[in-house]
Structure formats: C-alpha cells, structure tokens
Image: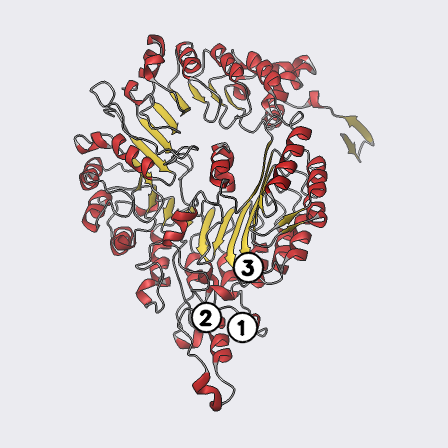
Amino acid sequence: MAVHDEDTMSSTSVGMSDLSDEILLCILRHVPVCDLVLNVANVCHKLHTLCHDKTLLSTVSLSEEYLADDLLVRHALRQLAPHVQSLSLNGCYWLAGSTMELLSRCRGVTHLDVTGCRLTTPRLSRLLSSLPLLTSLAFDVTAGFTLARLSSEAVDSLNRLSELRQTLLTPSYGVVPCCAQLRKLMLQFDIPDVTKEGVGVCCQLMVGQSSVPHYQQLEEFTARLAPGEVNQTLLLLYLAVFSVHVPKRLRVFLVSIPGPNPAHWPAAPSLAQSLNRRGDLVALQLPRSWLDASSLKAALEGNSPKHLSFSRCSALRPQVFQSLLEGGVEDAAQLLSLNLSGINQVVYSECRSADDHLVPWTMSRLAVGCFNIKHLNLMHTHYHHETPNQGGEAHLCASLAKFRHLCSLTLPACALSDGLISQQVSKNNSPSSALFLGFKKSPRVGFQNYRPGSGPSPSGDSAAALKQLLTGFPLLETLELIGPGFVSALPRLEPCGRAHVEPRGMCAWAQGVGDAHVAALEALPRLHRLTLAGLPGVLKGTGLVQLAGQCRDLKVLSLANLGSLKIMNYTPALLDTLKQCTQLQELRLEQPYLNADASFFNALSCCSRLRRLCLISRRGTFDPSATETFMERCCHVVMCHMFMGGTLVACRTLQKVLQDRFSVDRPALSVVVYPLQHEDLPSVIRDIPLTLLDRITLFQSHVAQPPHLSPL
C-alpha cells in the first residue's frame, strides 16, 4: 500500500508487519481457524505469535469449515489443544469418528458442541473422562446409546455440567439423569414414528429412581419437536417431574410442538403459577392447548420477559394484548422478540369479521410500549385494509413502521395490500349488461381467484403502504412474506402445515401483492435473508431484478410458489436476478414447474459464493450436464439437493456422478437428487443430516425465536 504525501512528495511503503497488533488481530478474526493455525501462523514470527493469541483461539468453531477434511482437522486440533476453551463442531457430519478421538487432547475445554458428529457411546465416554473442566455439552443421542456404557469418570464429568443440549434420534433420557447440576437444558426431538422397515417405534423408557430427571437447579428449559406422536410422548416423560416439582429458579420455558393438536399437559397451569413467584421470567412459549387466559395472566404478571411466543394461540389473543398493553407485565420495554403467528381468532373463514384481523391502532400501542422489539412474527394473521375514503383508518404498515429496532420480520401478504385490489375486484366482477345478471355467479367474500386483469390500477401506487413501512426499518436484515395457503411440498412438515393453513386463494387482498411490492424491498440495503412464498400476484418477477440490484449483501434467498402454479412465468427475471446476487450463499427455490436447464445453471454460476442449493419441483426437469458444469464452476457448493420430476434412474445417476466427482475436494459435500413424488422420499429425507435438513425445510415460524435460547 502506497501512501503519498503531496507536501513532501515522499512515499512510504506500508506492509502487514507495520500494522499494529490490534489491527492485525481484527483482520485475523476473519480468517478460518484451520488456515489461521496451519498456514498464516507459518508466514513470520510476528504472525505466528498473533495467530496463537488467546483472543483468537479460546473460542473456536469448525462448523463452517466445509473444505476441511479429517487430516486437516486433526492437524488443527493438535495446534488448538493447549489454547481452546470453547469448541464447536456442530454439524461436522463428514468427519470420521476417529477424528473425534483427538478432542480428548483439548483438556482445557469448558464448552463442547459435537451435535451431528459421529460419536458412539464408548467414544463419548472416553471424551468426557478426559475433559475435567467441561461445563457445557451438546451432542446427539443415537440408536444404541446407553448410560451403562459410560465410565465412572464420564459420569462424574456429566455431574459437573451446567448446560446440556441433546438431539434425540431415538427414545432415551440421554445423559440427563446424570446431570444433577443442570441449569440449562435444550432438547430437540427428531424421532420418526416408524422405522425404515415400517416398524412402529416404541417410546417406553426404563423408569426408576436413578433414571428419572429431577431438574433441581434448572433455570432454562427448551424443547423443539419434529412431527410425530413418539416425540410428543417422549416430551411428556421429560416433563413428568414438573407435575410434582417445578424448579424454583426456572425463568425460561420454551416448547414448540408442530401440528394442530399438541398433546395435553395437565401441569401447565401450575407451571404458570410458579413462573410468577420470582418475577424474573425471561422467555415463554407454550403450545396453544396448554394455557388458558387466567394462567397466562398469572405467568406474565410482575415479570419483564424478553422473548414471548404465542404461535397459533388464538384463544389467548385478548389476554396477550391486555398483558402487553395494560400493565400485565412489569416492563414491556424489555421485550426483544414476539411471535404472534396465527394469533387471529380464526385461521380462515369465508366471511371474516373485523375482530379476526390485526388492528392498526393496537399495533401502534404495541410499538410504543414494546419499543425495543427486534424480532416480530405476524404470519398466519390477516389484515384487510379498505380504501382510504371508506374509513380513514391508518394502514397497518404505518403502525408497524414504529418498530424502529426491528432486525427480523415475518408478515402475511395481505398486510401489504393498500385496498386498491378490492376496488378492482368489484369492478371486474360487475356484469357488463343486466341481461347476464341472472347467469353470473355471485362472488364469495374473501374467496376470489386471481386473474391477470384484476391487479391494481396503474394510476395508483399499489406498494404505497409497503414503502411507508420500509422507511421505518433501517436495521432490518431478515424479512419473510408468506401468502395464505402456502405449504411446502417437502413431506417432513407438510402434514402439520396443511392442518392449520387455509386454502390457497382464500384471501383476495393477498393476491394483489406482486411485482411492485417486491421491487419496493430495494429500500432495505442491509437485507441479508429474504423469503417470499405463496404470492400469486408476482407475475413477471421484475421486482426481483430491481431488488437484487440494490440489496447487494443478500446472502440467503428463498422463493416458493410465486405467480401461477401451472406455469413459471418469472423465469427470465429470475435468471437476471441470480446474475446480480454475487454474495448469495444459500438458495432455496420451490415451484411446481421449474426447468433447471443450462440457462438456469449458467445464471446460477454467477453466484460464486453459493454454498447451499435446494430445488423443489413436483413436475420440474433438470439438465444433468448443466448441473455438473455448475458444480464445477461454483467450487464452494457443499449442499446440492434437488427434489424434482424425472425417473428414479436419472436422479440416482446424476447424484452418483456429482458425489463421485466432487466429494474428494469437498469433504462435506451432500448431494441428494430424488423424484419428489416417489414413495420412498420420506426415508431419503430422514437420512439427510439435521443441520442441512433444517435449512431445506422452510420453517415458516423461525423469525422471532431467540436463536441463543432455542432454534424453534
């Protein structure tokens, strides 16, 4: 770097070694840890010293080191062993079990995350025995796990744990009965109801005084469930002790159960009463059938929670707003994340009343009282704005714009409509002659189907309300716009989704949200994650091109069921959009008729930083040669999942070609190519590592969930 001084006409050459240690440390924090200790540290003596600074090596994560094979990780672990205190290998599914053995050298580790790694019970036992300072552990409980195979030293190590996260892949208590000092327990239940062989999974556990969890010191409890009766039954076994004794220090209780009918838990009211005693509640989420209004009031009264979730708790709607707006909580300004997904009194009906909609005035009051909210989820709600001259009511977008600190937001599509669509629908539905009046079927309120000619008038600004909304969000990084009736075609969550999602096309207001609204999103320069799903009004996709031109830091893009489901009209605009997304790292694209041909993959090749790709299309086609060329050009892609049309032979052939050709240079490569309508698809999806499965499954309610507490 040359620095020119115009006064003295002298120049000085400044190199890396001339920078201060503080600046160099800031730079080195962005270097992958394997490169840091194995390459950069060998450049010179100064960099060697800085690369081993405790600020760089005390907390280490290898979760994103997708190009690091077993040999590289082993070398890195030998260098890290004397320094590391917090080590995460979360999602390192590609590493061999023998590599896990080297973790025992990191004797100073206090926090260890090996979720998704190949770790047998004997290896876990040896690992725990060699880590005397361990206080936090995260791992998977797989088939064959048993406490009896843990050594006495391992049990002693578990007894010192204060934090535990278990991913349960088989019915088990895991190591919980050995952890008498637990303060934080995080559980993920992902057990299928039937095995691959079609045999039902038994959830009967050995119950005895030594095997039942007691949670004497517990402060935080979180549980996330995949669909299935076994998962719900196992959760109730974990919660059985709560019926007898609720931990006195409990301040976080988050339980997420998918589906419309969560298992009943009789101890929920007593839990609510217990949460009210200390006045230090931090986070609360319960299935809708577990609490009534009086119990919720008791749980919130006198507390100042930071995270609240009332997803699909329509019966609690009056009490929720009363507690938040009328002094039911001690300090509403402490609230950081709020999930009101499905808080409407009814999910859908042909004739909705005003009581079933979000009220702008109420949301304005909420924005004033809870002014520090950073994460807000309003999915599965409705707002139908009438034309300005019919009521003069301020638009919901104007109320939401008052949440000035929002970082993530999920909205129903109809919340963006400014009412112009209703005028146009009425105009198009009126007969041209009285002669045909008796032959024309009367439109059903709220059930009009979209027609190309029914869009808003060109003379009006159909995205005016959205533009007003976006001006209030200078910090927004994550945005989800979900249309009513959208359900992903992936079978993992599809049954649960269909159980509580209204039919597509039910909401006429949502059908007017289209290209102009997508284009208006260009006003969010800090946007990193964008989800657009179930928007039939997106016809040509021109808004996507305009958005990509301004949101240059977009890293995650998910598009699903835009426009017509019978033909993909926005393909040209999509290709132009992909060519501009140079920073994109993850793309999820779902459309019934997707043609993944050479032009598609050529455009996608412009996303040089792409790491994960998921294509979902029931009747879609793909070009094997173009797919292979794309994988060659985009060398960072480690996940290529394509659930398309075509024959099983064609899919398996492409999968084998990609895996054989690129897995040597990409140790973490995961390739799945399979017909979407094949009967064996659920078994195929079950074999995908959970760390990848959570990315390709569109968790529509993940916004407004505190990630440091639980990824619900």
Colour convention = secondary structure
Which residue is at 31% across, 47% downward? 332
Screen quadrant of the N terminus: top right
Front one among 634 and 107 = 634
The residue under label 2 is 448
Q: Is label 1 in a helix, a strand or a loop?
A: helix
Q: Earlier in the sequence, mark 1 or mark 2?
A: 2
1 and 2 marks in contact (CB < 8 Å): yes
Question: What percent of the width, then of the height, locates residue 291?
Answer: 23, 46
Q: Earlier in the sequence, mark 2 or mark 3?
A: 2
- Quarter of the figure that contains the C terminus: top left
Give me the disc on residue 454: 1
SS at mark 3?
A: loop
| Viewer-nearest of discs 3 and 1 | 3
Q: Is residue 376 above or below residue 358?
A: above
Residue 5 at x, y percent in the picture: 78, 33
Q: Which residue is mark 3?
A: 565
Q: Position of residue 433 (x, y in %)?
A: 50, 89
What residue is at 47 percent from the left and 58 percent from the top? 483
Which amino acid does the dot numbered 2 rest on?
Answer: Gln
**Residue 181 coordinates in the image, percent (x, y):** 28, 20
* Relative to 166, residue 72 above or below: above
Mark 2–mark 3 Cα distance, whole angstroms, equals 16 Å
Q: Is 411 situated above or below 170?
A: below
